[in-house]
Image: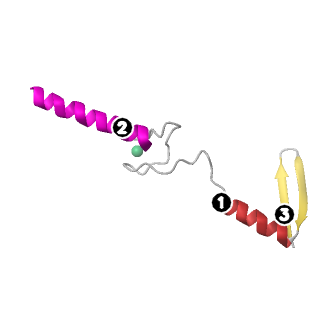
Amino acid sequence: MAVIGVRTALGEDVFTLSDHVIRALCRALESYRDPEDRGNCTKCGGRHLDENLHCRDCGQLHGILGQVIAEHARRVAASDEGAS
Ligand SMILES: [Zn+2]
């Protein structure tokens, strides 16, 4: 048995939960992932990646789109060097 107190702006209440519910709740919390949490920037370690996995701190792009853009930028840079 466990007792959980919840307090919000509208008021507060206390719930008694059975062991079965507590175990289920713990499992749910374990597998929970914050959709806003997009991990750390691989370049500066910042935690401010926007929905496009673009780091607001250093500008690094992550994920498939970031790799494609970085690859394209390298090719453009390489062809520029070759042309001059
Ligand atoms: Zn960064």
* Residue shown at 90% from the left, 60% from the top: 14
Q: Looking at numbered disc 3 in the image, what kind of residue is underneath it?
A: Ile
Dot 1 and dot 2 residues touching (CB under 8 Å): no
Q: Which residues are magenta?
A: 61-84
Q: Is 74 on the left or on the right of 47, as rendered?
A: left
Where does label 3 land, which residue? 4
Which percent across, then down, holds residue 42? 39, 50
Answer few, some or many: residues within 10 Å of disc 1's Cα (few below 14, many 20 plus, some between 14 and 19): few
The quadrant the N terminus occupies is bottom right
Answer few, some or many: residues within 10 Å of disc 2's Cα (few below 14, many 20 plus, some between 14 and 19): few
Q: Give SS at disc 3.
A: strand
Where does label 2 land, which residue? 68
For residue 57, which numbered disc appears in the image? none
Q: Is 32 on the left or on the right of 46, as rendered?
A: right
For residue 31, which numbered disc appears in the image? 1
* Residue shown at 63% from the left, 50% from the top: 34
**Label 1 residue near ligand 1, CB within 8 Å:** no
Task: Determine the image quadrant of residue 72.
Answer: top left
Alpha-carbon distance for marks 3 and 2? 48 Å
Of helix, strand and loop, which mostly describes the magenta segment? helix
Q: Is 65 on the left or on the right of 16, as rendered?
A: left
* Residue shown at 49% from the left, 36% from the top: 52
**Label 3 residue near ligand 1, CB within 8 Å:** no
Alpha-carbon distance for marks 1 and 2? 31 Å
Judging depth in this view, the residue of 48 and 26 nearest the camera is 26
